[in-house]
Amino acid sequence: MLVMRLTYPMKVLLMSLQVLVALGLLNVWLLRFGRGSAYRGGDAKTMREEFAVYGLPGWFMVVVGVLKVGAAICLIAGLWLHFLVMPAALLICVLMVGALAMHLKARDNAQKYLPALAVLLLSACISWGSYTSM
């Protein structure tokens, strides 16, 4: 198996992406949870309303929130504990695919699902970087 060695600037970039993705998720799920956003699905004003737009139960919102906040914390901890990075980034990828599916289900316009797509792509880059630096 061919494994590339990452250069120092690439490692710094990937660590920066970890922090960016983690802080973005923490912002959405802890600071903006009950606030409106142009990116919420349908006409939802809060996270609870957004999950209702998608037809998902309240308990599922709690599960997704715990997973996203936990993964964000793992990305930050992964700056020191590298083994946490890949599982956290892969989990975020899976969750973002689900978010994109829900935006499509709600027939949202591109403005509403572009953040989820961006986080998916950034998390995929983090996963790849974590794999190549094993």
Image (tube, rainbow, N blue to C red):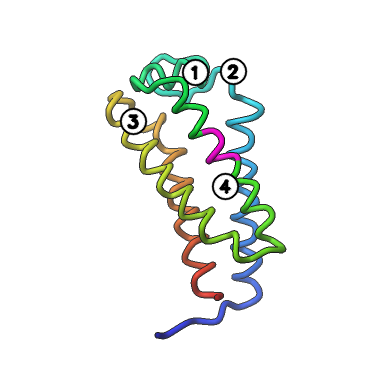
Q: Earlier in the sequence, mark 1 or mark 3?
A: 1
| SS at circle 1 | helix
The earlier-in-sequence mark between 3 and 4 is: 4
Q: State which tag comes first along the sequence, 2 or 4.
A: 2
Say few, some or many: other residues with alpha carbon within 10 Å of mark 2 (under 14 / 14 to 19 / 20 or more).
some
Q: CA distance from mark 1 to mark 3?
A: 14 Å
Label 4 sits on a secondary structure element that is: helix
Quarter of the figure with residue 29: top right
Q: Are the residues tagged 2 and 1 within 8 Å (C-beta)? A: yes
The three-letter code of the residue at mark 3 reads Met
**Residue highlighted by disc 4:** 71
Name the kind of residue labelled 1 in the image: Arg
Q: In the drawing, does residue 77 fall left or right of residue 45?
A: right
Distance from label 2 to label 4 (Cα)?
Answer: 21 Å
Q: Crowding at label 3, few (<14), some or many (≥20) Cα neighbours within 10 Å?
A: many
Q: Secondary structure at mark 2?
A: loop
127 within the magenta span? no
- The part of the chain drawn in magenta is 65-69
Look at mark 2 in the image and give the residue it sits on.
Answer: 34
Horizontally, residue 3 falls left or right of residue 85, namely left
Please state, as top left, top right, bottom left or bottom right, where the N terminus lies in the image: bottom left
